[in-house]
């Protein structure tokens, strides 16, 4: 494989219009989805990436949930390694998914929104010539597949087989696009995705290593479980998060109270959905209604995850039964986290811990000691692409901004990151999370909302893990604020972020977001 130097890095990032062109071999793979060029090494591991949509780190029993039991998700970590400090760099579907694929920040790969809102419709998916890890694995001799929720506006590239849920999709009788052709399936969507994953594994070529991206719809809203889970948690009272039902703290950024992602604003449980009737009477007294919506939300969220867990188990069992588990790397993660009532919120987007933290479990028997826990090293969604490539014996392009976990998996001392950059661009749009970026270190988090209005927040994660005490105006922390502001500038410069802040916002539709 040719060395990917800085000039080629620019080519691979879709700047052909500037007079540069892709090397012919890579152009053919990126644009035409050419077949395998090389031959994989004899012992090349298989790779399975399992990704639900919007799963909070707190919504797995391996991370301490005492109500929701996720034995199959837990298997990945219990038989491998659990990362406790795992994060995404943009907490929403399409930008984060593109970061998983490319090893790049959103401002580098260009997918800065879901592209589904007025003012953002022109935001397309990945550039036609953007190189991703599936493309490079395929070039190196892997057979590659994606089944389930894609949710990037460009079609999948670099895959020998793909069965993609159309858009957000429904929870029942979903419409798919399979290798370019529309197909409608019957059943619950996550069961269909499990069926499609197993069909691929059974029918794949047996003379090549495989890479399977196995991606669920749940637990994204509107949280419609299969009826077999309707009675789950029926007699359980979900504990309220600390401060639930109270207004935002006085020193919190105005941006927090101007979002429209408060549980009090949810209408999902007042109306009938695809198969499930309304669960909450909207005429209840306000306080009682708020608590009823919270209970309905979290229980439905947990119920759809029970279906994901079952289907994770089906694939893990298949790998065991076919003798594939020993040489298959399995990673379980999520495209972003989610609020489950913390700060009064649902959804994600904001640079607060429940939103940016994700589960990150990796199993590779014989290479990763079972039951290991990494409590210290911060790993990111942008690390997955370089990790898969290096573990597969494929050269990691030097333009990728993430880092391979290989030294961490081998339990070697590594000069690892001390902090990372977070970025959020999609505003004005659904839920009205205002544009911001920030830096998170082991102890400190500094957030900058740079427009409407310009404001800052500083949180001491050691002493205030719930992020309720904004210290940015405290003179005792002036030096910390100044240092972290410089660090944001440095991280932006290091990753080529030279655009925002200062860019003109899309036109705000009347009534779209609170002023």
Image: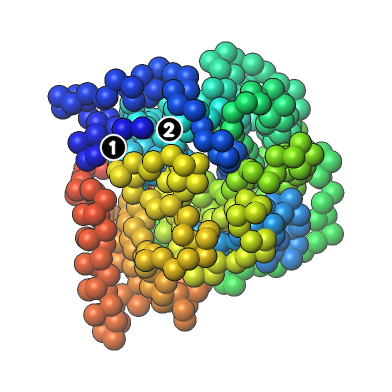
Q: Residue at x 27, y 70 (%)?
A: 484
Percent from the top left, x then y, of residue 176?
61, 22
The quadrant where residue 505 appears: top left
The quadrant where residue 307 appears: top right
Q: Residue at x 60, y 46 (%)?
A: 329
**Pointers 2 and 1 in contact (C-beta within 8 Å):** no
Residue designated by label 2 = 136
Residue found farthest to the left: 19
Could you tell me if residue 35 is visible in this image?
yes
Percent from the top left, x then y, of residue 191?
74, 33
Residue designated by label 1 = 4
In the image, taking residue 70 as reference, residue 112 lies left or right, namely left
Which type of secondary structure does the marked residue at label 2 adopt?
A: helix
In the image, taking residue 366 as reference, residue 133 lies left or right, namely left
Figure disc tally: 2
Q: Which mark is residue 263?
A: none
Percent from the top left, x then y, of residue 430?
45, 42
Could you tell me if residue 173 is visible in this image?
no
Identify the image quadrant of the N terminus: top left
Which of the colour schemes (rainbow, by chain, secondary structure, one colour) is used?
Answer: rainbow
Which type of secondary structure does the marked residue at label 1 adopt?
A: loop
Q: Depth check: 353 or 407 in front? A: 407
Percent from the top left, x then y, of residue 166?
56, 25
Q: Residues within 10 Å of mark 1 (few under 14, many from 20)?
A: some
Distance between mark 2 and mark 1 Cα atoms:
12 Å
């Amino acid at each position: 494989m040719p060395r990917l130097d800085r000039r080629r890095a620019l080519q691979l990032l879709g700047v052909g219009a500037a007079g540069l062109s892709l090397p012919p071999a890579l152009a053919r793979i990126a644009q035409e989805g050419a077949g395998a060029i090389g031959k994989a090494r004899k012992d090349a591991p298989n790779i399975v990436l399992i990704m639900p949509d919007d799963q909070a780190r707190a919504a797995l029993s391996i991370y301490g949930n005492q109500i929701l039991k996720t034995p199959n998700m837990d298997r990945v970590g219990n038989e491998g390694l659990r990362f406790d400090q795992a994060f995404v760099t943009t907490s929403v579907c399409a930008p984060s998914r593109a970061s998983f694929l490319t090893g790049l920040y959103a401002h580098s790969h260009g997918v800065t929104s879901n592209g589904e809102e007025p003012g953002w419709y022109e935001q397309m998916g990945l550039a036609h010539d953007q190189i991703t890890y599936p493309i490079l694995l395929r070039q190196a001799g892997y057979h590659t597949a994606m089944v389930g929720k894609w949710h990037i506006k460009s079609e999948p590239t670099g895959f020998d087989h793909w069965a993609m849920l159309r858009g957000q999709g429904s929870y029942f009788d979903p419409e798919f696009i399979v290798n370019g052709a529309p197909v409608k399936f019957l059943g619950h969507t996550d069961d269909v995705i499990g069926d499609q994953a197993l069909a691929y594994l059974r029918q794949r070529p047996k003379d090549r290593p495989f890479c399977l991206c196995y991606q669920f719809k749940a637990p994204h809203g509107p949280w419609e479980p299969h009826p077999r889970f309707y009675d789950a948690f029926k007699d359980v009272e979900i504990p309220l998060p600390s401060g639930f039902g109270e207004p935002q703290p006085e020193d919190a950024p105005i941006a927090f109270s101007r979002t429209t992602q408060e549980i009090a604003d949810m209408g999902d449980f007042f109306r009938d959905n695809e198969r499930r009737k309304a669960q909450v009477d909207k005429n209840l007294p306000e306080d009682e209604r708020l608590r009823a919506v919270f209970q309905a939300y979290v229980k439905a969220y947990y119920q759809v995850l029970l279906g994901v867990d079952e289907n994770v188990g089906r694939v893990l069992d298949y790998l065991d039964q076919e003798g594939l588990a020993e040489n298959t790397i399995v990673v379980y993660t999520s495209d972003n986290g989610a609020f489950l009532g913390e700060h009064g919120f649902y959804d994600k987007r904001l640079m607060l811990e429940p939103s940016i933290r994700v589960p990150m479990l990796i199993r590779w028997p014989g290479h990763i000691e079972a039951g290991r826990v990494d409590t210290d090293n911060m790993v990111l969604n942008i690390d997955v692409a370089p990790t898969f490539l290096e573990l597969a014996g494929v050269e990691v392009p030097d333009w990728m901004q993430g880092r391979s976990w290989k030294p961490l998996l081998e339990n070697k001392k590594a000069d690892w990151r001390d902090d990372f950059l977070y970025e959020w661009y999609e505003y004005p749009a659904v839920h009205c999370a205002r544009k911001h970026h920030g830096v998170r270190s082991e102890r400190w988090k500094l957030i900058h909302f740079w427009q409407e209005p310009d404001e800052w927040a500083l949180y001491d994660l050691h002493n205030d893990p719930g992020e309720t005490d904004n210290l940015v105006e405290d003179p005792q922390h002036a030096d910390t604020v100044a240092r972290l502001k410089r660090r944001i500038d440095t991280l932006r410069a290091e990753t080529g972020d030279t655009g925002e802040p200062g860019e003109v916002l899309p036109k705000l539709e009347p009534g779209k977001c609170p002023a």
